[in-house]
Image: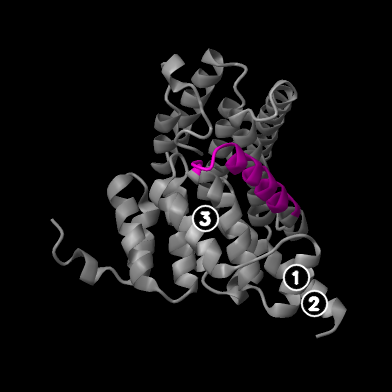
Amino acid sequence: MRLKDMALALKSRVGQAILLCGASLACLCQRAAAVDTSASSVSLDHGFSLLYNLDFAQAHQVFLAFQQEQPDNPMGPACDAAGFLFSEFNRLGVLESQFFADDKTFDARKQLAPDSAVRDHFNAALDHAESLSRSRLTESPKDRDALFALTMSSGLKADYAGMIEKRNLASLHYTKEATAWAEQLLAVDPDCYDAHLATGVSQYITGSMAMPIRWLVRLGGVSGDKQKGISELQLTAQRGHYFGPFARILLAIAYVREKDKPRARELLVSLQDEFPQNPLFTQEIARLGNQPLFANRP
């Protein structure tokens, strides 16, 4: 393969990093982020539950209320940015499995048409989260909320650039940033299971690439091990907090790509049971063939 062809292939396949990144459905830790919910009557958990049930308007109100109670906490605007991204993903059908079924389908995806108002709100929320985070890190370099919010911010940017704007190289840049912030967060608190989402994405996608392309990516500072990536996503799926359900969604997509439909269906059924107002899971189960799973269900 000529260097030019390798570069073109890299640009195309690097966009797959968004498949698992993002922090976005945008969007982390049971205790590592150390969001002081005990000091707040507003639950970020509730906001994320609303997001997974596709109630974006109410989730937005929850995240705004959190920001009003804790205006210096970057997690408020970071979570709100995740809400804006998830709403765009839902509107544009980004997370439907056929979008990711194979490399050919993924590479042939079209650049989507984002809502300009949502994009502006999304970027403003990220700017606010990053400003608060960097201010807190100046005073305390190991501030967990700040590191967590910056991990989310970079992951959400990677999602938006790759999945909506089809800017694959920009997506890779943000993915690297998200991984770097996640590693700092895990150094502060190894029990931040949601932080493994960012590192798992990078490992899985890079490890899935053909060797010449993987070599080029590694020259850019991104290593890859597909099985390690899946293991990290499984850790987030099992023990993550805000992004545990999102990790299950991404694992289901990964299992479809790996031709392991039974495990994909198992995850989708668990998500359907937990978030019954989200029709995406029912639709994806139907695409995989759901009769055996539902034969004995009430």
Number of marks in picture: 3
Q: Is residue 85 left or right of residue 4?
A: left
Percent coordinates x, y for residue 60 in the rendering: 50, 29
> In this rendering, does residue 63 appear at all?
yes
The furthest residue to the bottom: 1
Q: Is residue 283 above or below residue 135?
A: below
Q: Is residue 156 above or below residue 235?
A: above
Which residue corresponds to mark 2? 6
Q: Amino acid at mark 3?
A: Gly
Q: Amino acid at mark 1?
A: Leu
Q: What mark, if any, has residue 10 been given in the picture?
A: 1
Q: Is residue 123 above or below residue 40?
A: below
Q: How much space separates mark 2 and mark 3, taking CA atoms?
A: 30 Å
Which image quarter is the N terminus in?
Answer: bottom right
Percent coordinates x, y for residue 243 in the rendering: 47, 44
Which residue corresponds to mark 3? 93
Percent coordinates x, y for residue 265 in the rendering: 34, 65
| Residue 175 on the magenta segment | yes
Q: Is residue 260 left or right of residue 151?
A: left
Residue at figure coordinates x 52%, y 68% from the top left: 227
